């Protein structure tokens, strides 16, 4: 009995890499997948920002206060409070997936404004000249804010945050220089700069250049990584789609293979083959419209696929109303014979009492056999499919047909019975038969649960 399945193969990894991803129009489902990941990233970004704000607040609370306690106004707690409120609002919107791009840009700018506002308030809090805040180590948090924007995997938001930080620091320096033009406190002495509130223009220039360089490098890295993200999403989708037509294990091998889907390479392995067919399907199909028939078959296949998958089997082929499944090929299973029998028994259970269409019942016959098969991809260069071949596949199909002669639902070959040593099974011998196409007789059994 010849088994084959053909489906159009997906584009290979090399062909995807050869394409300019700017020209790739992603399907809506893939764009939604990327969008979903980015929206989840915004939740993570919001949580990290809240953690940073709470760290600020904790440090401010426990740090010794060197300013006078009699001051009428302490700006830092107010700025921190505004920052916490803003971060909570942003987190709530991220959770509700209500953060459009314009709000993300605005959020990155507001983040920088609030952080720089906090730094700016230091000279008021500690009653120092404005140049005092230029030496605050809190400046380093700007790089954290730029860095966490990379979690969105979009260089635009890194750039908007970095440019906002650079412009903001320029304005902070300008404020210091213009606050008192008569004494702008500029110095060229590094020691004086380090030991006083003097301003060293070169040091501020270095800070701005560092902000812009980190932003540029991170944005460039994200631009390249975004291409890899698209490739990953496309290949992941291809693997999921391919696994609908070939076994999942084979799909993964194709995706990971350097050659892609290559025909003509088969693997010889021992496995247990399970073959199912619907009793009297030809007569039943004549009573249903084409639409009803397809709907009934899809429901039927979904029901019997459950036990097969549950016990480690892999469906290699749907052919008409028949299903060919293998255990231990292509997915390894040391207890493949017992699992195939378990799946067959459960198939009978899940179909019991199920009505398909107008009072129609599908009685399923199953044949099970264990032996060597050849599994691999077959087809042409443009169309390939996975299947298993060999005398044992043909024998399994013949065993399924013998159910009609013996009035049974499941027939198991002796080769399977010998390996299915589970105590829950009760095998009843039906006899010894000669199957067309084989030069030897086969002992056959039916099976039930103890």
Image: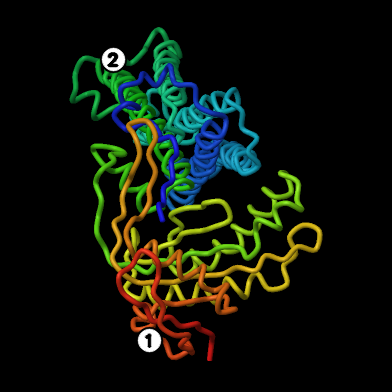
Quadrant in the rendering for residue 205: top left
Which is nearer the eye, 46 or 223? Answer: 223
Q: Earlier in the sequence, mark 2 or mark 1?
A: 2
Task: Determine which of the numbered discs, if any, sits on residue 403 in the image.
Answer: none
The residue at the point 74 percent across, 49 percent down is: 292
Q: Please name which of the two marks, 2 or 1, marks the residue nearer to the observer.
A: 1
Decide: is 158 above or below 39: above
Specify whether residue 175 is in view. Answer: yes
Please, is residue 237 above or below residue 226 in the view?
below
Picture coordinates of residue 416 (x, y %)? 37, 78
Q: Residue at x 35, y 72 (%)?
A: 370
Q: Say which element carries label 2.
A: helix
- Mark 2 lies on residue: 201
10 Å crowding of disc 2: few (<14), some (14-19), many (20+): few
Which of the 4 image quarters holds residue 156?
top left
Report the Cα–Cα distance between label 2 and label 1. Answer: 84 Å
- The vertical placement of 303 against 258, above or below, is below
Coloring applied to the structure: rainbow
Horizontal and vertical percent position of residue 376: 31, 50
Disc 1: which residue: 421
Q: Position of residue 307 (x, y in %)?
A: 53, 68
> Observer-nearest residue: 118 or 268?
268
Residue at 56% in and 69% down: 365
């Amino acid at each position: 009995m010849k088994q084959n399945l053909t489906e159009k193969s997906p584009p290979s990894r090399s062909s995807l890499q050869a394409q300019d991803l700017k020209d790739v129009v992603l399907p809506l489902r893939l764009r939604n997948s990327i969008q979903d990941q980015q929206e989840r990233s915004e939740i993570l970004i919001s949580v990290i920002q809240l953690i940073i704000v709470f760290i600020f607040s904790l440090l401010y609370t426990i740090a010794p206060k060197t300013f006078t306690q009699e001051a009428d106004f302490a700006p830092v707690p107010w700025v921190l409070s505004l920052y916490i409120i803003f971060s909570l609002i942003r987190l709530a919107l991220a959770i509700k997936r209500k953060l459009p791009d314009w709000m993300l840009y605005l959020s990155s700018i507001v983040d920088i404004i609030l952080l720089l506002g906090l730094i700016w308030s230091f000279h008021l809090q500690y009653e120092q000249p404005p140049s005092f805040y230029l030496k605050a180590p809190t400046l380093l948090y700007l790089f954290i804010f730029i860095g966490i924007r990379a979690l969105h995997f979009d260089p635009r938001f890194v750039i908007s945050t970095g440019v906002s930080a650079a412009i903001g620091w320029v304005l902070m320096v300008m404020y210091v220089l213009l606050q008192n033009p008569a004494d702008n406190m500029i110095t060229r002495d590094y020691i004086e700069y380090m030991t006083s509130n003097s301003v060293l223009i070169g040091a501020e220039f270095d800070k701005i250049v560092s902000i812009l360089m980190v932003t540029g490098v991170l944005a460039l890295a994200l631009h390249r990584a975004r291409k890899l993200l698209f490739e990953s999403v496309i290949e992941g989708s291809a693997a999921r789609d391919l696994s609908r037509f070939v076994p999942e294990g084979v799909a993964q091998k194709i995706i990971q293979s350097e050659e892609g889907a290559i025909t003509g390479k088969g693997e010889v392995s021992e496995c247990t083959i399970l073959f199912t067919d619907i009793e009297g399907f030809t007569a039943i199909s004549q009573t249903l419209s084409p639409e009803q028939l397809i709907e009934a078959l899809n429901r039927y296949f979904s029901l019997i696929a459950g036990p097969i998958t549950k016990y480690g089997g892999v469906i290699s082929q749907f052919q008409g109303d028949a299903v060919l499944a293998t255990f231990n090929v292509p997915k390894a299973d040391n207890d493949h014979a017992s699992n195939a029998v378990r799946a067959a028994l459960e198939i009978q259970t899940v179909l019991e009492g199920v009505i398909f269409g107008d009072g129609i019942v599908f009685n399923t016959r199953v044949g099970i056999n264990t032996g060597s098969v050849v599994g691999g991809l077959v087809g042409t260069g443009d169309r390939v499919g996975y299947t298993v071949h060999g005398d044992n596949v043909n024998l399994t199909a013949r065993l399924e047909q013998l159910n009609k002669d013996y009035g049974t639902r499941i027939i198991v070959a002796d080769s399977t019975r010998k390996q299915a040593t589970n105590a829950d099974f009760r095998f009843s011998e039906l006899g010894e038969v000669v199957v067309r196409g084989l030069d030897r007789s086969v002992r056959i059994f039916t099976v039930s649960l103890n």
